[in-house]
Image: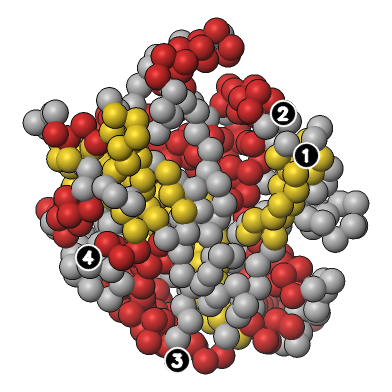
Amino acid sequence: MRKFFFVILAIFLFFLSSIIIPAVKVKNDEYYDFLIITPSEFIDGLNPLLEHKFQHGISAKIIDVNDIYQGKFFPVVGRDYPEEIKYFLKDAYEQWGVEYVMLVGSKDEIPVRYVDLCNWDNHYECISELYYADLFDSKGDFCSWDSDNDNVFGGQDMDGMIDEVDFYPDLAIGRILCKTLDEVNIVVDKIIDYENNANGESWFNNVVLCGGDDARLGLREKMFEEWFKRPAEIVWEGEYLGDAVEDIMIGFNPVKVYATGLLKSESKFLSSNNINEAINQGAGFVMFIGHGNYDKAIKTNFPMIKFLWLPFPGGYTTIHSRKLQNQEKLPVVIFGGCNSGDFHAGNSPIAWEFIKNQYGGAIACFAATTGSIMFMSSLVIEAYTPHLILNIFRFYQQGIVTIGDIWQNSIKAYLDDEEAWQLGVQFSLLNWHNDLANYLVMEEWTLFGDPTLKIGGY
């Protein structure tokens, strides 16, 4: 009888422990989908976003960047502030289950990693937010991007990469370049209003496509067919890419603002006023394909008059973007030109100007932090920056609606596309005299905005 009593007691204690122990574990452990890293002065402005995310099932936490440096959460590891942040993100990924990270502040407040670029044996640097997202190498070890420990990150020479860099993003990283609490409040209000109210609105079904002729090579574009052993027709690259987006975005209304708009009834002429008018009507997406820079979204050619730059006379610039009045009808904007996301040159590239516009602009942007690359001819859609751009639309149409997931997948798809990669190598050997252009396209591709943003709202 006594033995029977102890058997019953043991069984009772076993079942009791199976009930109690998991409850204690869940209570004590931290799990977050989303981290927001920011200076302390922005925390109050970000708290409403935290509550908003909780309401939509996203567990989030705000981290004062100085708490990372002081080891409040995990032991401090790293040679400098960017590496300390990256090791913190590795710990947060492994111990908290973090998938999305938003960096709030300029390059001085939330430091950046500059990577080495090699072009014609000349070395220069650009900002790469992918550095923070690529936590692990192919073996599952921490990926420092400086495997030879020379303090040059993503080190290159004329023969290719020196440092062992994985490039596959383990996190979705977005940045908002707020300099003041007022800017934080503007962006937070825009995100909350968009996610709560955009769903089902008719304006969202517009996609504004802006482009012209970018190569200016005329019949020489046909030479690519011989060089690369692939069909290569003469096209007006910006408009050709816009038409490719139209083919992908079934169910959307294409609003074409093209250099040939004077000649084609189905498109508007590429002027700054027409661009603003199209955006002010509302759109789910806007794409600019043409030359760009820090304060310019697009500058391209009229196809038959190579010396005529459009929008006339100096392109579509921050001056024009600040006049946008689209209010709550906010698009995701994709910039195909050079340097439109370059926040090394200053804290407010045109990609950020769109987002911080309190009267409209954009809800989020994709842009390059240095010179973007594209082919001349119909090969334009096969590799480099246009490959990433088309994948944004493809993944959205496949049902991926979280913008950080789209950023990650656009990079992964490029890395996994052997034909695109090989074409990129061939062109780089011809144009740069090395094979590194593919790496640049990965490193510079940046998401400005909230990586957990649900495109089209809830």
Q: Earlier in the sequence, mark 2 or mark 1?
A: 1
Tell me: 37 left or right of 305. Answer: right
Q: Earlier in the sequence, mark 4 or mark 3?
A: 3
The three-letter code of the residue at mark 3 reads Asp
Q: Earlier in the sequence, mark 2 or mark 3?
A: 3
User: In the image, which disc is placed on residue 44?
Assistant: 3
C-beta proximity under 8 Å, tags 2 and 1: yes
Q: Earlier in the sequence, mark 1 or mark 3?
A: 3
Distance CA(mark 1)–CA(mark 3): 47 Å
Distance CA(mark 2)–CA(mark 1): 8 Å
Q: Residues within 10 Å of mark 3 (few under 14, many from 20)?
A: few
| Viewport quadrant of the C terminus | bottom left
Residue 80 percent coordinates (x, y): 79, 73
Residue 349 percent coordinates (x, y): 46, 64
User: In the image, which disc is placed on residue 421?
Assistant: none
Q: Which residue is mark 1?
A: 121
Distance CA(mark 4)–CA(mark 1): 42 Å
Q: Residue at x 46, y 53 (%)?
A: 293
Q: Earlier in the sequence, mark 4 or mark 1?
A: 1
SS at mark 2 in the image: loop
C-beta proximity under 8 Å, tags 4 and 3: no
Residue 281 percent coordinates (x, y): 13, 56
| 62 to 263, vertically: above or below | below
Between disc 1 and disc 3, the foreground one is 1
Q: Residues within 10 Å of mark 2 (few under 14, many from 20)?
A: some
The three-letter code of the residue at mark 4 reads Leu
SS at mark 1 in the image: loop
Q: Which residue is mark 4?
A: 324
Q: Residue at x 46, y 70 (%)?
A: 348
Q: Which residue is mark 2?
A: 433
| Viewport quadrant of the N terminus | bottom right
Distance CA(mark 4)–CA(mark 3): 28 Å
